């Protein structure tokens, strides 16, 4: 449901540092998201899009559930707390809910460009 991505390289010298975050994939869209504390984003899934996330600041609680064939959520929930510096991938057909614990800013990277007229954003049956 979620894959945390380790840094692939880290280097520093007197000039500063270099931290390698992502060296794989074919990404089509990059976005920055800012959310006030105690807000909720997501509560949807994607049929054709994988999403990569890079947390720049803040703390977020993420609830994940696999989506079954009939748009119903699997009974098994996985909950993760992420924070500044975390990098992770959420695959398609996983419902994801982001609850900000404090003001948060993150980068969202999509494997498919979002089609504004027909977005790959789907809701489950509650």
Image: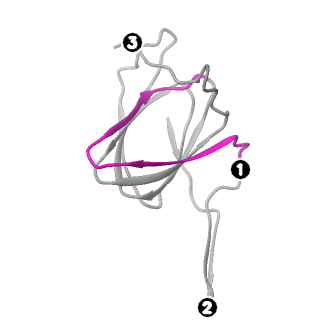
Q: Are marks 1 and 3 in contact (CB under 8 Å)?
A: no
Identity of the residue drawn at 55% across and 26% down? 46
* Magenta stretch contains residue 46: yes
**77 is higher (above) or lower (below) than 71:** below
Say whether disc 1 or disc 3 marks the residue closer to the N-terminus: 1
The residue wearing badge 1 is: 24
Foreground: disc 1 or disc 2: 2
Q: Residues within 10 Å of mark 2 (few under 14, many from 20)?
A: few
Sequence-wise, the earlier of marks 3 and 2 is: 2
- Quadrant position of residue 124: top left
Q: CA distance from mark 3 to mark 2?
A: 55 Å
Which portion, as a residue range, is magenta? 24-47
| SS at mark 1 in the image | loop
Rounded to the nearest angstrom, the CA distance separating label 1 from label 2 is: 29 Å
Disc 3: which residue: 125
Q: Residue furthest left?
A: 38
Residue 6 is situated, as x and y percent measured from the top left of the image, at 56, 58
The disc label shown at residue 14, or none = 2
């Amino acid at each position: 449901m979620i894959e945390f991505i380790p840094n692939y390289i880290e280097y520093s010298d007197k000039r500063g540092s270099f931290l390698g975050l992502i060296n794989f994939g074919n990404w089509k869209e990059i976005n920055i998201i800012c959310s006030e504390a105690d807000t909720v984003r997501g509560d949807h899934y994607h049929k054709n899009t994988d999403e990569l996330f890079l947390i720049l600041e803040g703390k977020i609680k993420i609830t994940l559930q696999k989506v079954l064939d009939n748009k119903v959520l699997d009974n098994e929930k996985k909950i993760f707390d992420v924070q500044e510096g975390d990098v992770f991938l959420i695959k398609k057909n996983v419902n994801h809910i982001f609850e900000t614990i404090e003001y948060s800013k993150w980068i969202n990277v999509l494997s498919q460009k979002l089609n504004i007229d027909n977005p790959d954003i789907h809701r489950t049956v509650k």
